[in-house]
Amino acid sequence: MEAISPFVAIRRDLHKIPELGFQEFKTQQYLLHYIRSLPQERLQVRTWKTGIFVKVNGTSPQKTIGYRADIDGLPIREETGLPYRSEHEGCMHACGHDVHMSIALGVLTHFAHHPIQDDLLFIFQPAEEGPGGAKPMMESDIMQEWRPDMIVALHIAPEYPVGTIATKEGLLFANTSELFIDLKGKGGHAASPHLANDMVVAACTLVVQLQSIVARNVDPLDSAVITIGKIAGGTVQNVIAEHARLEGTIRTLSPAAMEAVKRRIEAIVRGIEVAYECEAAIDYGAMYYQVYNDPALTAEFMRFAEAHPGMNVIRCKEAMTGEDFGYMLAEIPGLMFWLGVDSPHGLHHAKLTPNEEAIDRAIAFLIDYFSWKGNAE
Ligand SMILES: CC(=O)N[C@@H](CCC[C@H](N)C(=O)O)C(=O)O
């Protein structure tokens, strides 16, 4: 029998029960059950939808330090073949939120037993992958009451070895917006295209035209991505499709570029309506504000991490990934960092297999960092 640490075991338990945004009922119960097993003297626990806030009362608090872990999974069919693979068909922790939760529980466990001077607020946040839990959580009464003075979060990074922390001052993650476009034309017999308005052809044209926005309308010194990840239309091979739907995401480095990209999408979609005599509807779904790290806190954090045995610190470039933690950082100074987990398959891949050694190393590092920050001033 393989010997594993308690927080690796927790990660595996959570890995089996991934749930989509705001449906994290089993996950919430699992987390609550564990949190209630800790010494309760200094803990205050409050649920918010499928999320949880846990406050650890400090010994003589001057401030509150926040730590956020996201808890939802993705609609991906797991292909790892692991003995602890997802038991929820078609859903997977393919973005590492199982690792994020187990690290948060590890750090919380330490401070429940060994409180520091300052208060700590652990935030288990639902729906990071969509439709977004951070923004409504920020607006909640609990957050207003327990609002931290600084806040930290991490995200696993499959491309870095275990023992790596990668971050930077300022912009770390992009502005994002989901993108859903429905096209409605006129169906008909496959043999009579002149009597129909074919939405498969309209959708294909639209996908290609959308790619011209990044190439021709975005400042080359800025950056943007438009990815259409899903396209659906039609019913059968010999019927002209009356309806087609594109699903995608927009990523930009600046909020201004996001607005510009959306204006161009709307103009191109109006052109498709005219050219293909169809009706189009655009829905931007969930939008996430950029992750912007507080420069002073991040520089200090990186210096601390560089001095920490076993941690290699990289000043990375910004990424086009999105994270609704950006809404927390928009109001509370803090930072996010990448944690190396050395997986041959990347984020959102059905074979993502983070190296679990990263869990205990991250717990030890964060305990040291929060102990230092929370006893410092
Ligand atoms: C770290 C990461 O992978 N985050 C997700 C966030 C998704 C945002 C939203 N659902 C969208 O697709 O725009 C990402 O895909 O970057």
Image (tube, rainbow, N blue to C red):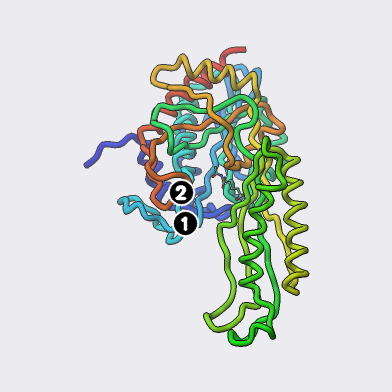
User: Badge 1: how crowded within 10 Å, few (<14), some, or many (20+)?
Assistant: some
Relative image position of residue 248 (x, y in whole percent) = 61, 56
Residue drawn at (54%, 38%), measured in percent from left and top? 69
Residue 217 vs 361, above or below: the answer is below
Q: Could you say whether the residue bearing mark 1 is in a helix, strand or loop?
A: loop
Disc 2 element: loop
Residue 76: mark in rendering: 1
* Residue beneath the point at 46% across and 47% down: 30
Query: Residue visible at 49% across and 31% down?
Result: 108
Measuring from the top left, give residue 234's x and y in whole percent.
58, 76
- Please give the residue where the numbered disc 2 appears in the rendered image: 94
Above/below status of 196 relative to 120:
below
Q: Amino acid at mark 2?
A: Ala
Q: Quadrant of residue 125?
A: top right
Q: Quadrant of the N terminus?
A: top left
Q: Quadrant of the C terminus?
A: top right
In this rendered view, identify the residue nearer to me: 83 or 111.
Answer: 83
Q: Hey, which quadrant is residue 20 in on the image?
A: bottom right
Q: Classify 10 Å Cα crowding around label 2: few (below 14), some (14-19), many (20 and above).
A: many
Q: Is mark 2 within 8 Å of ligand 1?
A: no
Find residue 10 and report its horizontal and vertical position in percent: 39, 41
Of the pair 205 and 349, the residue shown nearer to us: 205
Which kind of residue does numbered mark 1 sit on? Ile
